Amino acid sequence: MTEQRVKGKPIGSLAGMLLVLAIALAMIVANALSRLLSAYMPAIIPMAATWLLAAACVFLLMRGHIVEYNYTVSGGQLYVERVYGVRSKLLLNVPLSDILALDSESALRSRWPDLGRALRATLKSCAIPVRAIAYRKQNQRHIALIQPDERIASLLWDDAARAAAQRDKWG
């Protein structure tokens, strides 16, 4: 079993406290503006804008600093999980023999124009380059974007293991 965890930049304790204070201050200002604007328009509009601001702040914080991705290659399978703290959700489970290619997203999309929306399991703050895998699932081709290190990438696309698997399957 080979495992890789992709993490974002950690937030220091002082930066975390300042971030929470900044979000709280932004919400107080947005609430005050909401009360002022509710005299000139229906109250639901400024209130909805305040809630959308709060949701955007939480989403950006979660996406950039709290979420992690775990790539595991075990027993001829690739597992991709999204991890929030101690909770994980399996995003992708594909046999290595069903991986069609490992390349850049643009190269795979030019090769197979019918690829749909990509499953994205990457972090912008991670220094490892993004690579795309095309895989077969239920007789359709799909694409996923991951950030594998060299160990995982070599396991995903091992020519010798692929040739042996094809010999075992087809004789």
Image: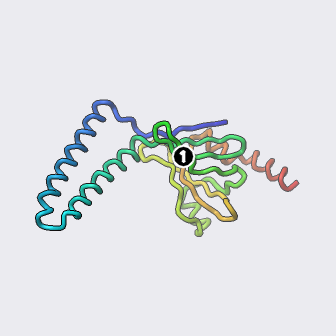
> Where, by quadrant of the figure, is residue 81 drawn?
top right
Percent position (x, y) of residue 150?
59, 40
For residue 79, side relative to residue 126 (left or right): right
- Identified at 30% across, 35% down, the residue is 16
- Identified at 62% across, 41% down, the residue is 72
Residue named by callout 1: 89
- Identified at 81% across, 47% down, the residue is 164
The image shows residue 86, relative to residue 54, as above or below, that is: above
Q: Which secondary structure, mark 1?
A: strand
Q: Which part of the image, by quadrant, shows the C terminus?
A: bottom right
For residue 74, side relative to residue 35 (left or right): right
The residue type indicated by label 1 comes to Lys
The image shows residue 138, relative to residue 76, as above or below, that is: below
- Identified at 66% across, 51% down, the residue is 94
The image shows residue 115, relative to residue 78, as above or below, that is: below
The image shows residue 75, relative to residue 121, as above or below, that is: above
> Where, by quadrant of the figure, is residue 132 drawn?
bottom right
